[in-house]
Structure formats: C-alpha cells, structure tokens
Amino acid sequence: MTDASVPQNVAPPPAEVEDVELYHAHSWITKYVFCQDAKVIAIQYAGTAIAVGILALVLSWVIRLQLAFPGAIPFIDASVYYQSVTMHGMIMVVYMLTAIFLGGFGNYLIPLMVGARDMVFPYVNMLSYWVYLIATLVLVSSYFVPGGPTGAGWTLYPPQSILTGTPGYDYGIILMLVSLILFIVGFTMGGLNYVVTVLQARTRGMTLMRMPLTVWGIFAAAVMALLAFPGLFVACVMLLLDRTLGTSFFMPSLVELGERKDYVGGSPILFQHLFWFFGHPEVYIVALPAFGVVSDLISVHARKNIFGYRMMVWAIIAIGVLSMVVWGHHMYVSGMDPWFGFFFAVTTLAIAVPTALKVYNWVLTLWHADIHFTTPMLFALGFLVTFVNGGITGLYLGNVIVDVPLSATLFVVAHFHMVMGIAPVLVIFGAIYHWYPKITGRMMDERLGKIHFWITFLGAYAIFFPMHYLGVLGMPRRFYEMGETAFVPASAATLNIVITVIALAVGFAQSIFFYNLFKSLKHGAPAGGNPWRAASLEWQTPETPPGHGNWGKHLPVVYRWPYAYSVPGAPEDFLPQNAPPMSGEHSP
Amino acid sequence: MSVMGLFFIFIFSFAMLWLARQGVFASHWLEEGEVAHHGRAAATEPPPAGKVGLAIFLAVAGCLFSLLAAAFFMRGDAPDWQMPPIPGVLWFNTAVLAASSIALQLAVVAARRAEFERVKTALLIGAATAGLFIIGQIWAWRELIELRFFASSNAANAFFYLLTGAHALHLVGGLVALARTTDKVRGAGRVTRALTTSVELCAIYWHFLLFVWLLMFAMLIGWTDGFGVICRRLLS
C-alpha cells in the first residue's frame, strides 16, 4: 500500500475552503477566558452546563425528600417545592442538556470530525458562550431576589405563571423569561456556527455521507433548534409583556383574590401552542446528538461498521422533520378538536418508525461484533436499554385516550425521565469517557468508570421504573402533598421512600465520576493519539490534545467513511478516514 | 398555524433540494472504479460562508416572524379584538423602506462594477432612508399613543407595537452591520471582493426585511383578514 497505488483519476478535488487566517491568542485572557478557539469554548460550555446540572441534581433531591417525607424537612414548604420543580426542569432541559450537547460536544467535535481548523465564525462563537453564561447567571440570580425563583413549573403556563399566588411573582418570573430570551439569542449565534461549519468547512473528500453520525446528529439538532427556539422566544417576549406592561396576549379576564384584573380576552392556549412548538422539538434536539454519539461509540467499541449508515442518516432527518409536527400531543389534556388529536397521535406514533429503525441498526451493529466492554460501550448499551424502555411508554402516551388519564400522574414523569433524562445523560457520560483521552491526552480510570456506570445505570432504573407503577396507581405528579387520598395505598408511600433513598445515593455516587475526571487530568495513564483505535478524523490529529488550528500545517484529506472497521485485507482492524486508499478498496 | 405550515413547507423543500444537490442520494460504494469518489466535483465555487450564514439566519428570523403572524391570527379570533386605526405615516414609511432597499441594490450593482464613489453614495442613501423609516415608525407609535391606543388596552394594539417593534429592532441590527460595511468601504478606498460580499449581504437582509414589512403591513391594515377566514375554515 504505497502512494503509487493511488490512481491518478481520483486525486482529491481542490480544497473546498481555502485556509483562512486563524485567530491567534495574544494573552492569557484571550487564550483561556475570552477565547475564540472552539475547543476552549466547548470546555467552557460543558463546564458551565455541568455546574448548573449539579444545582439541578441538588434540586431533585429537594423534590424527592418532600415526596418521601412530606413536611418532615422544615425548610421545604410548598413554595420551595414548586420552585425546585421548576428550576430542576428548566435547568436540565435547556441550560444543561441542550447546552452540553450542542455547545459542548458540538463545539469540540464538529471542527475536528469534519476536518476544519475552527468554527466558521469564531468571534460569534465566543459571544455565544458569554451570552449563555449571562443567561445562566440571570437564572441563578433569581435565588437572590425577594420572593425567590418562579414556581410556575418549567412550562410556565399562563395565567398562573404570572399571578400573585405563584412563588416568585415579583422578580423570579421576570428573571426566568429574560434568562430564556438571552439563552435563545446566545444559542442562535452558536447554532449558526454549527450549521455553517458543517456546510462550509468540511475538508477535502469529506462529503456529507462520509460524516460521522455524531456530526449528523448535532447538525440536525442544531437546524431543529434554530427553527424551534423562536417559538419559545416569541412566547417568552409576549408573556414578559403581559407581566410587565399589562398586555393581554395570553391572559384572559379573571378575578384574583376578589379583585378584577385588567386583562381581557387573552388565550392561554396560544401560549401552549407556542411553547410546545418549541417544547417537543426540544426533546429531539437533546435526543438526536445522543443518537449520533451512541452510533459512534457502538461502532468503535464493537469494531464493526455501523449497520445501515444511510438509513441512520435518513432516520435522523425523518425524526427531525416529524418532530416539528407533533407538539399537540402535549396538549391533549387542554382539549382540542378530535381531528387534531387524531392528527397529532398519528404523527407522534409515526416517529416510532425511524426511531425503531435506529434501534434495530444499533442492535444489528452489535450482532456478531467484537464487543469490547469498555466504559463508553457500557454507557452506550445502557442508553440503548433505557431509551427503548422510555420510548415504549411513549407509544402509550401518544394515544389521546391513554394520555388523558395518565397525563397528570407519575407515569409521565417516569416516561420522560427515562427517554430524555436518563438516556441522554448516560450518553453524555459515555461520550466524556470516550473523548476524554483526546481532550486531555490521558485515560480515565476504567475501574472507577465501571463502578460509576453500574451504580448510575441500575440506580436510575431503581428510581424511575417503580414510578410507572405509581403512575398507573394514579399517584399525581406536581403535588406538594398527597393528604388524605383513598385510592393511593400506604405501600405507595413506602415505595416513594425507597425511590428517594436510591436517588440520594445515586446522586452522591456521581462524585466517583468527578473524582475520576479530576484525578485523571494529572494521574491518568497517557492515552496517545488514538487509544480506542478509532477511524474517524478527530483521532488522527497530529497533536493530542489537538493544538490551535487542529491539523498542523496541512488539512487532512478524507478517502473513506468513518466506519472502516475490520476491513478485509487491511493491515489493522481499522482504516483511518485519512489513510490513503488501498488498491481494490471499496469503502463508501 | 397555517402560516407556520407554509413556512415549513418552504424551508423543507429548500433543504431537500440542497441535500439532493450535495449528493446524499449517491451511492459511492456501488460505483465502479478503484476507490470511492471524493464527492462533488467542486467545479463551481462554493458560496462565501457569510452568505450561507445569513441565509440560515434569515430562516431563523423568518420563523420568528411567521410565529408572530400565527399568534396574530390565532389571537385575532377573540371577540375583544379591535384593530387600531393605521397611522397614515406608515404608507410613507413603506415607500421609504422600499427606497432604502433599492439604494442598497444599486450599491451592489455599483460594487460589482467596482465604481467606488457610487457604492459609497448608495450605501449612505440606504442607511439614511432606513434611519428615516425607523423615525417614521416611532412617529406612528407616538401618534397611536396620543390617540390613547395603549398596548394594555387591546391585544390588537399590543400586536401592532410588538410586530412593528420586532421588525424595527431587526432593522436596527441591520443598520449596525451597514454602518460597519460603510466604514470599511471608506477605509479601503476601493472596492475589494470582500467588500462586495459585505454589501451584498446587507442588500439581501434589507430585501428580506422589506418583504417581511410588506406582509406585516398587509396584516395590520386588514388585507389578510380573508386569509384568517381561510385558516379557520381549514382548521374547523
């Protein structure tokens, strides 16, 4: 396999992007703080997201403690409970999951995986992070204003969200809305970068159908986010005007505490439409990058090409398109024309087709593969099981007639935590274990990683699996206290205590992960450039961790897809994307 | 929500066309030859990143305005809905914005011919007319407020302020970009390729905002009431 065997007629086309003048940091501040290098921005994004994620974890303990031992903990009153529920939900969905997948992994992996030196608009990219940070600070600052953060629930449904009975009426709700508006502005800047970089900055030979599925997932999610977040933006701006200027976009005429408010004729349903127009795609904005990452983890650690690559790409696109037209299934209980209900139920159930296709392809990739049970692989497999589990309850809830009685119960809590809480978080852990060697040059401890996996995976099941049962019993969600409720047996209270104890334990067990993360920075085994013997481009950088500009003097040239594992006749069991072609090779 | 439907059909067909042109349907591994091809032949030069970025931003902004329009029609069904009178100055503003758009288009034409002085003049006229448009919009707001059509008194008034405000803010953002472009043009002293692209970007953005304004204006003066009726028929 020498260069002479490269046929002349397939010489790579001229570079799709000319080498542009790179931004260069001149001082410590511009190198580590106000930095325009996507890799630094990625770590800033991920660090901030994990930090608020820890806050959200602590808030979930507050919720669980109240549910298990109502009234036993003095500082948890009804207001604190609702504030915790609201902040936990909002932080996890928007500030943690969206930010870490797109801002964190997107920034780090897109340029490296498509063979670019950096994002296309580095300055805007930097701005994106700083606006995100400000949005996060505004959100957290609501803990330090009179009345505390809003307790309106993460959906912020008017009219209750801006009425005086809701905790955080004075400032909390305003800060929440302002923070969301800032987040969306910041995200739009980042999202433009991710999309344009994928479109414009791919290196020679990197066609769309040679991109790793991680990039496809993040790309599709970024496009969806750009189209869906305006829904939340409009809803937040209009709600903010209702709250501050007294307009009546969403607020109907109502009497509060015996006093007639000035609002007239507004439509709370309109808010729900706008909110869920964003809210449902949001689920897939979180899920699609997770799908992509899992495909890569499974392929690398099973030493086999991903089964049905093209099907996987089309499934991602189909899920993205379908998810824009299913938002109504969150509003079955708000009441709607039966034909609407029918339409939304059909589109919702139709999403199961491309999703199931992806699951089959993952399983078929594992079939007869050389599976290495490394920590990233364990997390990927954990995702598979959890996601299927959460997806199946989704099929129940997609039907109007099943959803209406179950909607206000813990069944829904169990469903969405399985499908968009636990599943993506498992992928995040797997991805960190997988790419940590590239980011730091050192391996994370495998033994600690496996302990972390089993506690997290089994623990998460022990927490959320019984919740399905509680939901079917009729145990309502969102309630501060159950009070005297004849239909809930006493054993349900015991189950709630068990869940809470496990939740506390699993939460604390995450310190194993953080210990591993920080200890390995200095004491981890040196990883070398490509410890997993992976074929995709990010593992082929001349330096590890990749230097500024990623690729040294010359951009890589790509000759094949990123899944060339166990190719017959190849010298090793993988062929890097940028290795010159073998004679007679038929790689995609 | 029909507005959103139309908008998405447009975006979706555009995206699919683009994907097809990028070769997602090709099966390189089934083709004859030693090694798979390297994708598109790259005979044509790809568009500059700025243009692609702007196109995607316009999709986002278009989504925002379509959602506002959707909300406008949905809220407009309520019995309390009472549109405010339309200040006459809006007709003048429409003409001014159209003039601004034309001026920037002339700047593009001049930039392509590398006529430096004409680019400068056209850019200045474009900026001045856009500024005049914004002043005119503020004038219209003042007029309505003097007539006691407050945002809090009727949702239709609130929508008037919200729509025109959102549009004006986008134009202000555009003016910042235009000011930077004008500054660069003056600093450069001649028309370079990068400057031509900048001027083109400004012009595209201006045409987009003019298009949005025309639709918005039609909504505000009630020419689209028929559209609302059609939506309701379709949905019920």
Image (cartoon, coloured by chain):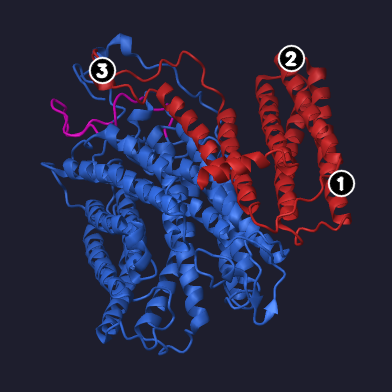
Chain colours: A blue, B red
The CA span between labels 1 and 2 is: 38 Å
Instruction: Assign the magenta stretch its main secondary structure.
Output: loop
Viewport quadrant of the C terminus of chain A:
top left
Say if mark 1 contacts mark 2, CB within 8 Å. no
The image quadrant that residue B206 belongs to is top right
Q: Earlier in the sequence, mark 1 or mark 3?
A: 3
Q: Earlier in the sequence, mark 2 or mark 3?
A: 3
Q: Residue furthest left?
A: A368
Say if mark 1 contacts mark 3, CB within 8 Å. no
Which residue is tagged 1?
Answer: B139
Residue A28 in view: no
Lateral position of residue A220 relative to residue B160, left or right: left
Which residue is tagged 3?
Answer: B35
Residue in front for this viewpoint, A144 or A281: A281
Q: Characterize the local packing of mark 1: few (<14), some (14-19) or many (20 or more) Cα atoms within 10 angstroms.
A: some
Disc 2 residue type (three-letter)? Ala
- Magenta-tinted stretch: A551-576
* Marked residue chain, label 3: B
* Marked residue chain, label 2: B
Q: Residue furthest top?
A: A9
